[in-house]
Amino acid sequence: MHSVVEDIPLFPSSIGTRRHVTVHRFGVGRPGAKIYFQAGLHADELPGMVILSHLVRLLQERQGEPNGEIIIVPCANPIGLSQRIQGYHAGRSDLGLGGNFNRNFPDLTPLVGAQLAALRSEGLAMNGEAVKRAMVKEVAALVPKDELDSMKQVLLRLAIDADFVLDIHCADEAVLYAYVSNPEHPAADLLSRYIGSVATIGGVPELVDFPTACLLPWRAAQDVLPDVSITECLSATLEYRGSKGLRDDVAIEDALGLIGFMEAVGLLEGATKAPSQVVTCHTTLDCVDYVRANAPGIVIFSKTPGDHVQAGEEIGVILDPATGDRSSLKASAPGVIFGYLYSQVVIPGGTVAWIAGNSPIEQQTGDPFP
Ligand SMILES: [Zn+2]
């Protein structure tokens, strides 16, 4: 399969330094759906970058061309990849003033109506393609003020008119799971099956992370055009287990799963990969139990991600080694543990484990992963 590689420069960060985002494009200009993959927005989350490097190679080795466009950004965050503190890589949050790299993306919803009105006045028919044009124009009109802004603009420009936006992350120690903004999308279940998601959590978070930034303008456009049938993008965060123990054979299987998904939705010809046999727990954001530390200390877990627990069941303790005091960590509802914090030195209020259940839980306020 033919690919085009492009290095897109970011704003300079300091004198003599200029970073870029590398993008691989397949099926440039071909009619059909568009799918966008990125990994490493949290730059210390490594499995996705390995998976997407294999995906690029597997597609390059494949015969034929896609029925649409495939855009792949294996390293979405060159800023985060460059950050080190006393010898240790620190890629989750901007060491400048930008905070968590996957927060505070521009909200494109307020201007969608005006952009669509302008396109309508030019005689363009109002449909999904018009929505894409409007969103592309909105992203192009953003005025970045620094390197981080320009990186967010570059990523949005590549993804905003895609029919499938798949942002690849991982936890510290976890099973494979996914956040799907719109689980009612016709391809949402296929996605869970082909990636082998143990837990798929549906719903749109209140914060504007990357997948949310890509989805919300579609919803705003539908509000402006209530009589037009619009299929919004499938917007998802795929969490490929934990950040440690990278293995090529596992990453290749994961890349093949993504190829299987593209075959299932018709972007690629053939059916080379069967869906996973994993039984997925489907739930929603309000049913996720984010277990938070209730004391400072060292977490010692007694359960493993993938284990099912009952309400009130202990999943571990927090030990204060100085005093020997132990505080119990308990599940508040039945469900499956799907992720852990790897750094086991914790402070009160920090999220240490997350459990997917099927009944709404009274959520603590605040971002569980700031
Ligand atoms: Zn992440």
Image: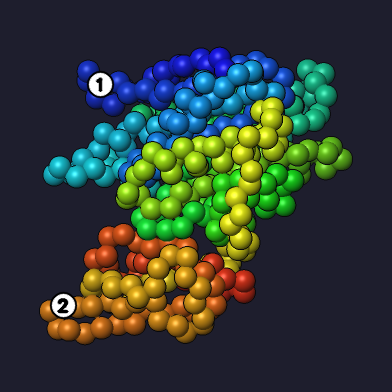
Q: Dot 2, how many residues are within 10 Å of its Cα: few (below 14), some (14-19), or many (20+)?
A: few
Residue 97, image x and y in percent? 31, 43
What residue is rendered at 30% in x and 35% in y?
81
Task: Decide if ligand 1 comes within 8 Å of the CB at mark 2.
Answer: no
What residue is rendered at 40% in x and 68% in y?
304
Q: Does 66 sit above or below residue 168?
A: above
- Please say which color scheme the image uses: rainbow
* Secondary structure under the numbered disc 1 in the rendered image: loop
Give the quarter of the figure containing the N terminus: top right
What residue is rendered at 12% in x and 79% in y?
322
Q: Is residue 105 visible?
A: no
* Secondary structure under the numbered disc 2 in the rendered image: loop
Task: State the separation of the CA atoms marked 2 and 1.
Answer: 45 Å
The residue under label 1 is which amino acid type? Thr
Q: Which mark is residue 17?
A: 1
> Which badge, 2 or 1, is on the more N-terminal residue?
1
Q: Quadrant of residue 74?
A: top left
Q: Which residue is mark 2?
A: 321
Give the quarter of the figure containing the C terminus: bottom left
Q: Is residue 20 visible?
A: yes
Residue 300, image x and y in percent? 28, 73
Q: Nearer the viewer, mark 2 or mark 1?
A: 2
Q: Does 299 sit above or below residue 206?
A: below
The residue under label 2 is which amino acid type? Pro
- Number of marks in picture: 2
In the picture, measured across the screen, residue 155 lies left or right of residue 286, that is left
Q: Nearer the viewer, residue 219 or 254?
A: 254
What residue is rendered at 72% in x and 47% in y?
185
Q: Does 18 sit above or below residue 165?
A: above
